[in-house]
Image: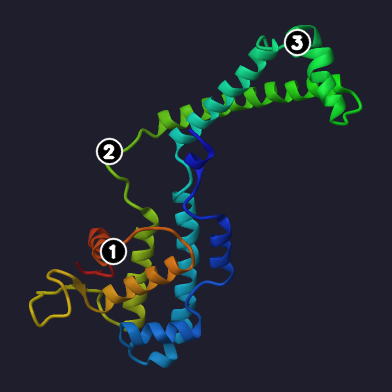
Amino acid sequence: MTAADLETPFKWEVVRAVFESPPFDEAETRALFVAVGPPPLAADKVDRASFYLQEACRAFAFDLWRETQPGIAAREAAALKIATACHSILSITGMASGEIDPSNLAAGLGAGGLFASAALRGEPSGKASIMNALRAVETLRTDALKMAEIEAKRRAMKPAKRGRPESASIKRLVAALSHLYFDVWERIPTVSRAKGGVHSEHAPNEPTGPLALLLEAVTNALQACGLRFYVTPDSLIKTWERLPADERGRFTA
């Protein structure tokens, strides 16, 4: 395991940028209305829709950030690897017992060795510098073992689920946009599937209609902000279809 295994798909600065300047200002919202199909009394709804879209984008960015953090197993493995590395340093230097004392330092590493190297580096006391460094290694080892213990308990309380976990952030975003569609376009959210054919601009079974266009346009805008997630028009609609009826805007279904 390396630091790369604990990397997230995007930096926190991307989330902060979405919070400070989310997509869908007034001009972008008007453009969205044109792309999806203008709702009734569109001019009167721009401000409301813009506010709702910006809040949905902020919520999604934060949800996605939390969702893409390293998992419990990865954190536990990293902590154990840190503890092992620290133990190796302590073992080589003769401090594996946990008692950090100059008398335990392996022969040849003290005076004329590490102490002298630290002094040449400019430390007032080479001996004090090296012993403090070794104490820091022991402290890091202890903290890493405690972290691994905590993560192991979390893992035991939250056993891994079978299969690929469904993105909760995408589900919440799709539900929010479904309600936006119901409120602004004043229609029950529905999805059609293209029949395809020689004269059709859509592939067979491709999702079509205003709701599909809305979901695709918003997720495209979020990806353009630097948020890294994978969706397709079809996966967005399948997510919508799996939502409870009230979250889909189908209040009587």
Crowdedness near tag 3: few (<14), some (14–19) or many (≥20) residues, C-alpha within 10 Å = some
Marks 2 & 3, CB-CB < 8 Å contact: no
Judging by the rendered image, the residue that carries numbered circle 2 is 162
Q: Position of residue 61 (x, y in %)?
A: 48, 61
Crowdedness near tag 2: few (<14), some (14–19) or many (≥20) residues, C-alpha within 10 Å = few
Mark in front: 2 vs 3: 3
Q: Residue at x 41, y 28 (%)?
A: 156
Q: Residue at x 87, y 29 (%)?
A: 123
Mark 2 to mark 3: distance in Å? 49 Å
Q: Position of residue 26 (x, y in %)?
A: 49, 85
Judging by the rendered image, the residue that carries numbered circle 1 is 232
Mark in front: 1 vs 3: 3
Mark 1 to mark 2: distance in Å? 23 Å
Q: Position of residue 215 (x, y in %)?
A: 33, 71
Give the side of residue 239 with respect to residue 202, left or right: right
- Quadrant where the C terminus is found in the figure: bottom left
Judging by the rendered image, the residue that carries numbered circle 3 is 105
Q: Residue at x 50, y 58 (%)?
A: 62
